[in-house]
Image: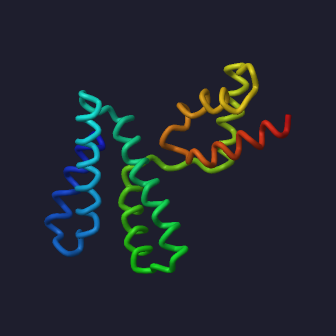
Amino acid sequence: MTIQEQLLQDMKAAMKAKEAGKVELSVIRMVRSALKNEEIHLHRPLTDDDVLAVLTKEKKMREDSLLEFQKTDRNDLVAQTQAEIDVLMRYLPQPLTEAEVREVIQTVVRDESIEPMNFGTIMKAVMPHLKGRADGRTVQTIVKELLAEQ
């Protein structure tokens, strides 16, 4: 079952749950709308990678909002945004730990013999392997650490 099919099934279940599925329903509707907009933008049906990219983007937007709400002590919005992130996380692959990310980066650098050893070339080679499974900021930090060690 594709992610889009799962979203449709979960949306139907949330509609049946009435008040209990209110947050889930709004998030799923928003995601389906974003997916439809992306499909229109790309002029083709979405692949699973495209769907994961949209889900990751939506999650990242909410995480950024969450930080701002926490800074301004908007606890009502913090709780709602965290609930939305929790719904989105159900459709994303399990994120890698920092140690796993570090291992993937080192493996890619070693296997692909990246030359010249600079930040841009490493990031370009590593990100396709970590797409949707690791935060870009984390990858960026680890790559900078590895470059500093050399």
In this rendering, the answer to whether 77 lies above or below 87 is below
Task: Estimate the x, y position of residue 72 in percent, counting from the top left.
Answer: 51, 77
Describe residue 112's horizontal placement relative to residue 43 as left or right.
Answer: right
Q: Quadrant of the C terminus?
A: top right
Q: In this orientation, which residue lies closer to the viewer: 80 or 3?
A: 80
Q: Quadrant of residue 17?
A: bottom left
Instruction: State the colouring used for the structure image.
Output: rainbow
Image point (46%, 53%), residue name: 60
Task: Estimate the x, y position of residue 132 in percent, counting from the top left.
Answer: 48, 42
Image point (39%, 52%), residue name: 58
| Total numbered badges shown on the rendered structure | 0
Q: Quadrant of residue 109?
A: top right
The residue at the far right in this view is: 150
Q: Quadrant of the N terminus?
A: top left
Describe residue 140's horizontal placement relative to residue 95 as left or right.
Answer: right
Q: Quadrant of residue 54?
A: top left
Image point (14%, 66%), residue name: 16
In this rendering, the answer to whether 117 lies above or below 41 is above
Q: In this orientation, which residue lies closer to the viewer: 81 or 87?
A: 81
Image point (53%, 49%), residue name: 95
Task: Estimate the x, y position of residue 141 in percent, counting from the top left.
Answer: 69, 46
Task: Estimate the x, y position of residue 79 in percent, counting from the top left.
Answer: 41, 75
In this rendering, the answer to whether 146 lies above or below 60 is above
Q: In this orientation, which residue lies closer to the viewer: 73 or 130?
A: 73
In this rendering, the answer to whether 63 lies above or below 149 is below
